[in-house]
Amino acid sequence: MNASDWTAFEGLRRQLSEEWPNIVAAQRRTADLLEELKSLDEFSSEDTSIVFYGSMGRGEVTERSDADWALLVDGPSDPNHPRVIEDVRQRLEKLGLEKPGQTETFGVMADSHELLHHIAGTRDTNQNLTRRVLLLVESRAITQPRVRERVLLNVLDRYIVHDTVAPRREPPEDVIPHFLLNDVVRYWRTMATDYAAKMFERQGQEWALRNLKLRFSRKLIFMAGLLHCFSFQLEPPANRKEISEEDLPRALARHILTRTENPPIEVMARTFTTLTAWDAARGFFAAYDQFLGILADENKRARLKELPLEKSSADDPVWQEGWDASGRFRKATRALFFDDPVLGELMVRYGVF
Amino acid sequence: MGPIGFSTGALAKGDFRRGLELQDAQETTAVELSALREDELQPLVEELSSLALSRFQYISVHAPSRLTSRSEDWLISLLHRVPGEWPIVAHPDLIREVDAWRTLGWRLCLENMDIRKPTGRTADELDETFALLPEAGFCFDIGHARQIDPTMTVAVEMLQRFGDRLRQLHVSEVGTFGEHRAIGYLARLSYRSVARFVPSDVPIILESIVPPERIQRELELARELFAA
């Protein structure tokens, strides 16, 4: 990621005369890693894209092990697809990047057909929902970015242009992608319930680290997704008045596509700036900066990983640090989403029901 | 390794002089002079004697892929003006007046086709045309074969059945809509699996549509794939 990815964030940082050093350091680490990952170009083919998610996708790399990725396929089946995946895996291992987690959501093939045609309904699995929403909110194509863009266009088209809308006498007051919004909310609740499920299955293993990630980075994904959905209302395009009712769905899909180019931190910075919510911005980024600082600290991270799930852990100083920061994060989030008259009204009207 | 080079059509469409010029820096040793569109053939034939071709070990000509306003007799008579030792690549679905095409004898090279064409896509379909033109040679288009069948079973079958007719290779990656493009990693993996069926001295003609700065890389990839 380069400087142009962080225009709003940098602008906000200067405006508020803040440092937020851990966020900045994470952005630099991401840029360095992206430079190394250019060697993956060797495995490039049209119709496939090597896409990174997680902290790489968000531009927040805190340690070198982060490597959630998938081979996004948007073309004919090829018996060599598994071979490409294995070759990429081996290359990432050589670069010192660890294999993705246990759920097999990453480090595998992601087929655009499923992402596009299995949205909601009985065939939309947890994995498919995860891959789709993360593609929208926290993904970065290392090879063939146009493939990622093409898939996103198709997915947004499905959510918005092909959504079945009840007939109305008047055009809607607000331009909201309801289907997409519902899926973003569903994904947030899925992340939260998945946390509970994993804690049960794994008997509380790594509960502290996962809990903090849920309170911070997972919640950030949710917020960015919500803001994508509200973006047409909060920041309408310059030619809004010229867009006919018939062309509105396509314009909305295009509008949201351009926003998906921004990592979640940048989406938040842009919103804080648009709404001139300076106090909330300070609280929000200071808390998130602290969270990234904990993750980047090898000792703190290791401590959180090993913290036993028992009452005494509540007093652990590292856990307390994270817990307190999450409280300030929650407060700033609530201020942003509910104190602003426009965004607050959108949240109540569309975010709750 | 046999001679290798580009089709002028891949680099510069109907501008064969530009297609030759773009290969000068790479010192390619093979070239296919392309007249894929009907109206490109006459200017090519008329200017052949003025082209600087002495460095090429292998030269072929690609006939138009279809005829809309001209007859096959007209086409064949023009093709007879091409120097006698140069193979002429043609698409099987173009051939209607078989007797006229027979006059080209061994010089005619039938190319296996992609998914858009009605025939010539598999060994069995090509067999039908070779039965009518027994002297004809074979231009194996590896990209077309992969588009028809990514497992390359069809490719192997063609190479095994028509190996003794093999005159040249067309090499590129072919997309879903028949577009020729730079050879990607998946295509390379597929091509590697059949390279051993291709004799090392067969001329290679690249059809990848690439910008000038990519020409050398494509040549290197092809050499790597088909080096003995």
Image: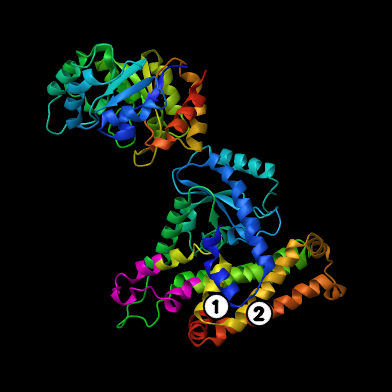
Q: Earlier in the sequence, mark 1 or mark 2?
A: 1
What x and y, as percent, mark residue B139? 35, 22
Crowd tier of the residue under label 1, counting other residues whose Cα lies within 10 Å: few below 14, some 14–19, many 20 or above: many
Residue A97 x/y as whole percent: 69, 48
Q: Is residue B13 visible?
A: yes
Where does the magenta region start and end? A228-254
User: To which quarter of the image does residue A137 belong?
Assistant: bottom right
Residue drawn at (49%, 78%) of the image: A274
B80 is higher (above) or lower (below) than A57? above
Badge 2, how many Cα within 10 Å: few under 14, some, many 20+?
Answer: some
On whether residue A55 falls in the magenta region, the answer is no
The CA distance from mark 1 to mark 2 is 11 Å
Looking at the rendered structure, the kind of residue marked 1 is: Phe
Q: How is the image coloured?
A: rainbow
Q: What residue does disc 1 label?
A: A272
Q: Position of residue A168 (x, y in %)?
A: 32, 80
Residue A105: x %, y % from top left: 61, 54
| Visible residue check, residue A185 | no
Q: Chain of mark 1?
A: A
Q: Is residue B179 left or right of residue A42?
A: left
- Does dot 2 land on a helix, a strand or a loop? helix
The amino acid marked with disc number 2 is Gly
Of residues A97 and A73, the one nearer the viewer is: A97
Main SS of residues in magenta: helix
Residue ID for mark 2: A283
Residue drawn at x 44%, y 14% as measured from the top left: B201
Question: Does the residue at mark 1 contact the one at mark 2 (Cβ under 8 Å)?
Answer: no
Give above or below for A11 relative to B115: below
Left or right of A48 in this view: A309: right
**Does the segment drawn in magenta span residue A231?**
yes
